[in-house]
Image: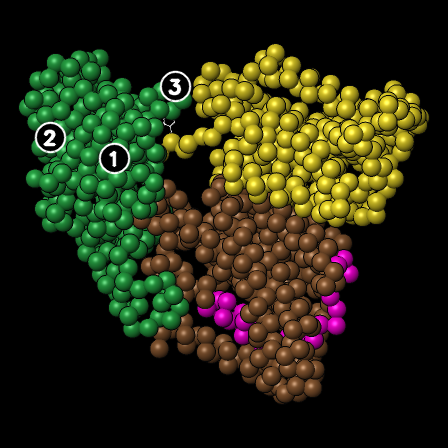
Chain colours: A green, B yellow, C brown
Amino acid sequence: MAELLRLEQATIRFGGLTAVNAVDFAVNEGELCGLIGPNGAGKTTVFNLITGVYAPTSGRISFGGRDLRGLGVDGIVGLGIARTFQNIRLFGSLSVLDNVRAACNLHRATAPGHALLRLGAFRRDEAAIVARANELLEIFNLGRFRDAPARSLPYGEQRRLEIVRCLATRPRLLLLDEPAAGMNPTEKTELIRLIQQVRRQFNLSILLVEHSMRVVMGCCERIAVLDYGVKIAEGTPDQIRTDPKVIEAYLGEDHGSSLAHH
Amino acid sequence: MAEFLQQLLNGLSLGAIYALIALGYTMVYGVLRFINFAHSDVFMVGAFIGYFAGRIVPEGTLWGGLVVLLAAMAGCAVLGMLIERLAYRPLRGAPTLNVLITAIGVSLLLEYSGQVFFGAAPRTFPAILPSANFTLGGLVLSSNQLVVIVVAVLLMIGLELIVHRTKIGMAMRAVSLNPRAAQLVGVNNDVVISFTFGLGSALAAAGGVLYALNYPSIDPLMGVMPGLKAFVAAILGGIGNIPGAALGGLLLGVVETFVNGSQWSTYKDAIAFAILIVILLFRPAGLLGRATVEKV
Amino acid sequence: MPRPHVALLLALAAAYGVSHFPGGLDPYLLDVLTGIGINIILAVSLNLVNGYTGQFSLGHAGFMSVGAYLSSAVSLFVAPKLVGELSAAGEVTQGAVFLAALITGGFCAALAGLFVGVPSLRLRGDYLALVTLGFGEIIRVIFQNVEILGGALGLNAIPGSTTLTWVLAVAAVTVFVVHCLVDSTYGRGFLATRDDEIAAAAVGLNPTRYKIVAFVVAAFFAGVAGGLYAHFKLTITPTGFDFTRSIEIVVMVILGGMGNAVGVILAAVLLTVLPEVLRPIAEYRMILYSLLLVLLMLLRPQGLFNFPARRPRG
Ligand SMILES: Nc1ncnc2c1ncn2[C@@H]1O[C@H](COP(=O)(O)OP(=O)(O)OP(=O)(O)O)[C@@H](O)[C@H]1O
Ligand SMILES: [Mg+2]
């Protein structure tokens, strides 16, 4: 399997706090990896480093062999890394369809000037984009909300819309930050199924941050564990479940019990 | 050399006034994270209160000057708190843009009310203080300049004491660091914000009276330019940073005075904005400010 | 033909028709209508920045003044050298010269927009408000100091080329361009930038680029509006394009409900007519304006002409 994403000694400091500390980690083509750790371990910060929201204080992050430094958030998406946000960041006043359309700009066939001329090429391009956006929305069963403003959606639907929006950028690697947060068990099962489905359908690699052990243990092939910004373990779900360091990190946390129960 | 020192002195006395106004911008920004556009008009109102009070007290006395200054400061403190209570508090938590537009509205309301009620024509500010010129070597220092510098320095020391030595000052700092956490540990944010507006407005009023003493002509739009420049000073020093505002004000006053004394004098009103653009390009956090990253 | 193009052609035809109105229009009405047209151009273009893209520019009058000065300079100084005495030239030549003047004014304003936008658009909204305001002041000071542009006295004897047809045609083009830009997949990027810049970047949009495009396009039309204004009033001064003028345009955008095209046009009409109606109490007009602004934000922040969106069907 070819290596897709690679973090080498990735480190970031905020003032005195080292939120991510010399993390080495890789995601291979087609893999579904988990990234777990107690609250404040630095998981979201790792996502922010990969997507260019923050620049690493030191270390190197590369994607498909290419160094990501200095590309900017939008440049990195262009290479094929899309993400969702832990604290949902949709375009609240835009309709559900327009949220997805906005994300289709990377693969627009016509230049902005065509919006004024509105020739055949432009209209075909727009029609294709809308069709594709609708298709993606249907996969996640969001078609019925098409014209509603995104902020009016129920919480779970908003999370799923964020995933749809990512898919519209045609990523190779999808970073999901707690996609199952706030969902009930039925919804979680459904979400796992959907994630597996789009992974196959769009040939994706996925890095998943999730507190729900049921979700992580249920679908990840490989898991890395962060604690206080340091990677303390990496391995298959079975290895992680029994790793003493991991159990210690989670002890005292309410997740400790859920880890043990599995 | 004497020429240079003279300009420096004039610059510092102008800068001290900018600094007084800039402090209000910076303090309000500290607790509420928004630019109080109406601040420059509070400065104007301060000068007008000074004008009317100055016609009651006898001219040319020190105590008269003190009364005028205190009256303006008290009046504007009340005005500032009133503005906050009526216009800004109902919008707490609303999008920045809405608050900003409201602030512009309040600013215009003060200016146009001023034009209707005081008339648009400039008025001559009474010579409240005894005046004399002191010469030191080749330097000429007018008593008004001296008063400006002394009063500004005293007020800034007072502010420093309030912010660092009193309970309310500590609460102010707490709110500016993290309003939610401050509330959790028992700080009443409303009181702190109200107090901040009062304090900032009092300083602006003092600035207004001092400005009017030195450039003895006032009108309802007099606040616009000094207000803008003081805002630039606040950014220059690092918005939200109190010593930064003082430093920025002094620097700006000096630069402007030197430009005014040069062949480029007709561009003196543009220089502040040129500085602003340069600062935003190269050091958006200001001289003493620290760059912050938004948490995502 | 796409619908926006049909609408544009109809509007242009109507604009042409107005000048051939039987018997001509009452001069006072003509004045008011021209004012309305110019304000529509200004408000609709500013709406692209303040409404759709969510940035807060307070310098629209500054861009207007750039357009006014530069287009007047073309008419007064450049054109006579190229085509000789304007009043002696044919109608087509006059029209071409005027068009060239307007476009020059627009381009210079757009250039100024680029110059102001690039440093400031990376920053928070309220900084932009002040930088644009400051820019307006710088522009004023510069025009006051440039002798060939009349210095503090300004320019006068500008040819009166502006007709209602010109104004309405440019207004139609402005509405068309802004509408077409925004109503497209590309244009969703302006709105996305307004709603959440970080999320916009995270789906591959470049928020800074969108802001600059919005700013430059808006500045262009403000410049053209300035040109129309100058060739309508026949004399301009540096102080004629001050902060209050910018505020007037901003109020139109806010009153119309930022990002609501029809609302903004209605507001532009209303706020041009209102001062005419309020002429007897002219001195209170600006007090009314500012009160309106504050009350609007407190009571109806979505604008006068903006109504709640449909509820989701789900
Ligand atoms: N922009 C920032 N400035 C300062 N500190 C930050 C910033 N972003 C993150 N941190 C700190 O870095 C640490 C790691 O935060 P992060 O959000 O990555 O944790 P997490 O593992 O995602 O936790 P959770 O499970 O709660 O989402 C925390 O202590 C957080 O406060
Ligand atoms: Mg997190």
Q: Is residue A208 left or right of residue C132?
A: left
Where residue A16 is drawn, which disc sits there?
3
Label 3 chain ID: A
Label 2 to label 1, Cα distance in Å? 19 Å
Above-or-below relation of A118 to B95: below
Q: Residue at x 71, y 58 (%)?
A: C146
Camera-nearest label, 2 or 1: 1
Say which amino acid is labelled 3: Gly
The boundaries of the magenta stretch are C151-176
Above-or-below relation of C253 to A190: below
Q: Does the CB distance between marks 3 and 2 fall below 8 Å?
A: no
Which residue is tagged 2? Answer: A222
Say which amino acid is labelled 1: Ile
The quarter of the picture where residue A152 lies is top left
Where residue C157 is drawn, which disc sits there?
none
Camera-nearest label, 3 or 2: 3
Which residue is tagged 1? Answer: A61
The quarter of the picture where residue B81 lies is top right
Q: Earlier in the sequence, mark 1 or mark 3?
A: 3
Determine the secondary structure under disc 3: loop
- What is the magenta segment's predominant secondary structure? helix
Label 1 to label 3, Cα distance in Å? 22 Å
Question: Looking at the picture, how far across and down is residue A196, in whole percent?
Answer: 11, 42
